[in-house]
Image (tube, grey):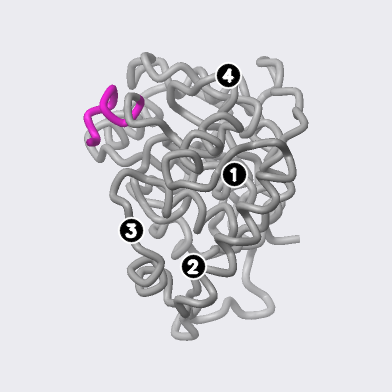
Amino acid sequence: MPVQRPPSPIAENPSSDSPSPGPDAEPAERPDVDFVHRNPILAGAVAWEWKRRATTVTLGGIHTSWSSLLLQDPLEAALWVVLDAYADDLVPLPLKVRSLTAAGRRCVVLGQVTPSQRAALSAEGAVAILDPDSTAAEIPRLIEAVVLGSTRPLVPQPSVGKELTDREIQVLELYARRRALTASALAQALGLRTTTVRGHLARGRKKLTDAGLRCVTRGELAKALQDIGYSITDNQWHAVGRW
């Protein structure tokens, strides 16, 4: 059965222009791994190192954004996806992992994370988290070890975040970021009504409050999300030179 395209929390219109293979067409062999990283230089170096090495694990698409991965032909999608932990976009990392896992794909995260973020990612289905200090020459070997089962997979942990819907995760995390988007600005960015965004905020905050977390103010909400591992701290963004 073909690997399904991961559902996106941001609405998309799939293209109908791509030709479909005929009934007698030979099915193409799927690659093992798709690689997603914000840094095109690192992504290109990893691709070059991968081709240079003799390995039984094949590399598929190289993407520099989450949206690029979503535009991939589902028939060319690899079972495994390596995700950059610090892609600064409209989809929080735990939600990406959840979407890929729901589509039957296996996710590996590349980047330094806190213990709470590690627990959240494992709860959403991440199989492994790789050392961000690894060189481009080392990354293919580390990924190969995960794919072949030589690395012990993460043990899923319980998480308050699992009680949140996809949209609640997305809206809460984006609202709590330091950019301080208003509900109306966030609604425009996501293609939603302002009342819909406010509804997601209210329901998500109630779930966090019911779990014993304070989230009345924007600052309290940011801390609550960081405490449960569903948001990246300002210090972490600074450390990777993003903000």
Mark 2: which secondary structure? loop
Looking at the image, how many numbered discs can be counted on the residues? Answer: 4
- Residue that badge 3 annotates: 181
Compared across the picture, whether 239 is left or right of 24 comes to left
**Tag 3 or tag 4, which sits nearer the N-term?**
4
Q: Which residues are magenta?
A: 236-243
Task: Give the number of the mark in front: 3 or 2.
Answer: 3
**Tag 1 or tag 4, which sits nearer the N-term?**
1
On the image, the x and y values in percent for residue 48 come to: 31, 31
- At label 2, the amino acid type is Ile
- Residue that badge 4 annotates: 115
On the image, the x and y values in percent for residue 189 come to: 36, 69
- Residue that badge 2 annotates: 10
Packing grade of label 3 (10 A; few <14, some 14-19, many >=20) is some
Measure how far apart labels 3 and 2 are at the Cα level.
17 Å
Mark 1: which secondary structure? helix
